[in-house]
Image: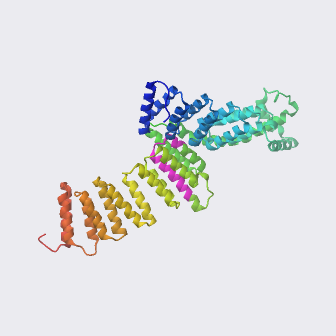
Amino acid sequence: MAMITGSNDNRKEWDRLWQIVNTNPTDFVSWTLLLQSCKHMNSIESIREVYNAFLSHYPYCYVYWKKFVEFELQMSNESNAFDVLERAVTSFPISIDIWIYFIQQLIHLNKKDNEIIVLFERAIKLCGNNYNSGDLWSLYVNWLRTRQDLSEVTFLYDRLLEIPVNSLCQHFDDFMSFVNQNNPICILTTKEYNRYNSKYMDLINNNNINSETNEFKKTQENSSHLNGKNLEESDTKIVFIRQMIINERKLIFKSTLKEMEERRYFEDNIKRPYFHVNPLDITQLDNWTKYLNWEISRNNDCNVILLFERCMVSCALYEFMWVRYSNYLIDKRYEMMRTGKEFFENFDINAIRSVFRRATQIHMKKSFKIHNLWALFEEREGNFDEALKILDKFQLDNPYLIESILSKIHLYHRRGDVNQVKDLFQTSIDKFKEYPKLCAHLSIRFSRFLFKVLKDTESAVDVLNSALKTDPNNYIIYLRLIDIEYQKRDINSTKIEHLFDNLIASTQSLALKISMTQRKLEFMQDFGFDCEK
């Protein structure tokens, strides 16, 4: 641990907070206090230590990624600052705020245009379809306009107008202004301009140009020049081409607007789109569930994945959401394998593993259900060793969780490794000798395996008798012994009668005594030969 420099009081507070968060990493309040103490640090190493530790547990906290970068920049560590930003977008790839901040830093530092474009495209690929990504698109458009890449601006608007972002109407208004302020030959590719020009010439030849352009000309009344040049001779042509540019995009805009309005109901009900350790209220969880159901029903895998990713930011601490996301990816993967469809990259085995890693290593470290689901997936993929590694790691952190032990046993059983199953059962039973109830539960499961799978009745009975020494008043063990005797080819009525007597004597429950006495009576009537009994 890096040492803090400063007053003794600061050092003591630093040590105290470190001890708290190391003991309990889920103590978010202590983390925030520790992060606030960074202003008292004179060592960038100490600051890095705090932020690296915190962000490994809470990677969805955009504000702290930004503060970390600012600390690096204040120390003139530009290279380290960009390393932190790369880590940020890797850990939180759908954060529009992080991407915008990252891009703004490149622009501010006058990085090369191609570097900035690459970063813009990475951001658009990962979160450009987000309902709230309007600011990212605006930044890209405005930057291209400052570079005078006007045909690229048009192409970018073509992409944007197909995305149902919340600011779609504003973007379309901006697009129309952009078209009206520039000569079409400057904002179109040569191929596209020639297409419009060809249509214009056809209409000229057919004497239809006036009717096509008359209405649109009304919007041009206040414009006497284009790009600073008098274009009176070609004004009709420019008006016509502008009209066609806008009309073609208007069709796309209206279609996209319809989808945007359908989404608005769900989006307006998302009151907390960011991560927080405090629980979400039930209406928020219900809205996410309904929104996911709606998106899945539309059968657009890209949009479903993006919505799940957004959901997992708000619902990162909800096990059932991780289970649903994982099951969706797995089900889609095997559906594609069955039908022979082309694989979507998010259903690749490594993409699914990435989701499981985020869940098990960051947000759901103590969730057996998620770990077991991952292990089952690896087993299904034929990766026995990987499945075993997942269960071993979870068991190492949770040595007394019986479900984890049984899952490992079941894994070996399905593989057909009977000796390993027996060894694991016996080792676990020995480990739980000081916990009679757990020991009894494992013993009952072990005896069932021995009796039903290995057909080893004698060993099954021995395991149960051994369990009775640890937990002599456990009536379930007696019932299991009685059940084994019942299922033998030759019933030993004396032995079963003796077991019933021991069971009745061992319990303090009057209701159980009456119930077992009734069962004993029924047994003696069915199988006994002594009328006195």
* Residue 37 to residue 530: above or below: above
Q: Residue 389, position in %: x, y?
A: 47, 55
Residue furthest to the left in view is 532
Q: Where's the C terminus, which quadrant?
A: bottom left
* Residue drawn at the location 38% of the way across and 54% of the way down: 403
Q: Is residue 101 left or right of residue 407?
A: right
Q: Is residue 351 magenta?
A: no
How far across and how far down the image is residue 263, in percent?
57, 41
171 or 511, which lies in front? Answer: 511
Closer to the camera, 284 or 235?
284
Is residue 318 magenta-colored?
A: yes
Q: Is residue 161 visible?
A: no
In this picture, residue 275 sits left or right of residue 234 = left
Instruction: Give the prevailing secondary structure in the magenta stretch.
Output: helix
Q: Which quadrant of the structure image shows residue 78?
A: top right
Please provide percent x and percent y for residue 226. 81, 30
Residue drawn at 44 percent across, 25 percent down:
8
Q: Residue at x 42, y 35 (%)?
A: 19
Q: Is residue 425 left or right of residue 316?
A: left
Image: 161 above or below 431: above
Q: Nearer the viewer, residue 413 or 232?
A: 413
Where is residue 437? Give x, y as percent: 29, 54
Res. 208 in view: yes
Please say which color scheme the image uses: rainbow
The range drawn in magenta is 310-334
